[in-house]
Image: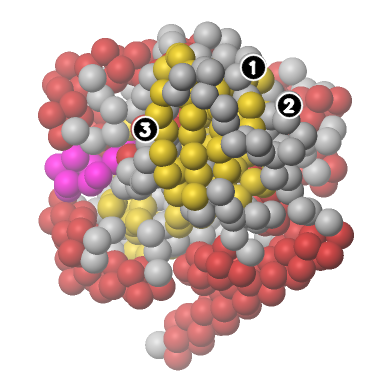
Amino acid sequence: MTARRLTLICDRLFDGAALRRGHWRLEVAGERIAALRPVDPRERPPHDAWDVRDATVLPGLCNAHVHIARAGLFGPSEPISLAQVQRNLEVTLRAGVTTVGDMGCAAPLVVGLRRRAAAEPGSGPAVLAAGPIVTAPLGYPLDWLSPRLASLGVVETCASSASAARAVERLSAAGVDHVKVAVMHESYGGKALPVMPTPVLAAVVSAAHAAGLRVLAHAHSAADYRAALHGGVDALMHSAFDPLDGQTLARVRDAGVPVCPTLWVFEAACRGAEARWDRDPRYGGVAPDWVRREWGAFCDAYAAAGAVMPAGIAAGLPKARAREAVRVAAANLLLLRDAGVPLGFGTDAAYGFCLHGRPQDELYAMHRAGLGAVECLRAATGGAAALLGRRDRGVLAPGARADLLVVDGDPTSDLAAIERVRAVVAAGRVVVGTGGRAATGPGTSDGPVARAARDLATRVAVARGLLATVAAGAKRALRVNAR
Ligand SMILES: [Zn+2]
């Protein structure tokens, strides 16, 4: 892997907002895009330039909602392994995703992932992490998280404005990149849940803003959206499962707050269980065998559960309501688009059939909902980056982080081209492919030694994070016992 000068010659580029044609030269110096300018086709490029005039150059994709440690089971509890975290990071990068927003894990894991990224830049996407989810006592996700997992520090509960400020202080000290709050009045299974009162939520937001952190709200209904906006959050994660009325839409638009729809994770649950994707050979190399075996158990339970959803996702909810929720979520996406609400992009991977390394699944779901290909790509580049407060990426412009995705074909007219990855550059480092027909372009120096060093760096960094997680959980348990 190299961090050096790189020049691309292209005649089709999507800059994070729109497609540009013509003859372009994009220059990378170090970690940044140094120049992007139209050039005379007769001008001779440097001898080692990538000639990608038969492809499309885009910014590296940004997936604003992932759970980077998960492998894809249904249900909240999952064994976390170093190998799995590393695999998730690798497949994410190989699919052209150069930044992810992790939306909930123990704070030490955040630190471990950051150490890993520092030890070996370019070995995974940039991970911007929320750390523990901030919620009301007994609020989401404590309605379904096992007490053991909760005790490992993946949730911060706030009963008062003072405890909200302290929780944000702890998160900020742990080094999170943003704060995720749960504002969910009704569980996935349809049961009432406590949420933070507006003053407590507002205290989270004001403490976060004072610390320079954005607040992203896990929200699933029009009422959730309104409550989250009332508290002053910066983004709404997930679709509402009930129709968004005109007043709510106007409030979202007027707040200028982006929405990340995460359609596929819910759509895939019913579709995959009915079509038995656990047995689908297309998932053979994509999901680990042990995950596919667990999928099999979920599919069996789904079939046996009759008219309601089985344990694992929205347990007890009538399947008819689950399907309706997916339809309504898709319709809401168009309402938001038509209202002029900025859209983000996130997969919520890995959860069930929604996996890391498959951004296309969510892109296609947004496309099926009625968004144009350009709108989908905008959400998955500049839109998602802006949602995470990182305007230095998701765009092709001088000064931006040199995250590039080169694909065969034109994804702005044929979205499926997004899967035809030719090259990925992350922060100026070539991490996949060689880009052009020119064999002289800088390639990946991913030999066995580099690879072994990378593996070791990951293991050490993530193990530190996991050990710290366990230590923090043990400390907490001791504290609870001492009380
Ligand atoms: Zn999530």
Say what secondary structure mark 3 lies in: helix
The question of residue 48 being in magenta is answered with no
Mark 1 or mark 3, whichever is nearer to me = 1
Which quadrant is home to the N terminus?
Answer: bottom right
Which numbered disc, 1 or 3, marks the residue that appears first in the sequence? Answer: 1
- Whether tag 1 and tag 3 are in contact, CB under 8 A, the answer is no
Instruction: Locate residue 199, reporting x and y percent.
Output: 13, 56
Q: Which of the numbered marks, if any, corresponds to residue 437?
A: 2
Which numbered disc, 3 or 2, marks the residue that appears first in the sequence? Answer: 3
Which numbered disc, 2 or 1, marks the residue that appears first in the sequence? Answer: 1
* Image: 283 above or below 139: above
Q: Is residue 326 visible?
A: no
Q: Which of the numbered marks, if any, corresponds to residue 383?
A: 3
Which quadrant is home to the C terminus?
Answer: bottom left
Q: Along the horizontal axis of the image, is 256 left or right of 111?
A: left
Please identify the quarter of the rendering in which residue 53 is found.
top right
| Region in magenta | 227-241
The amino acid type of the residue labelled 3 equals: Gly
Q: Residue at x 49, y 39 (%)?
A: 27
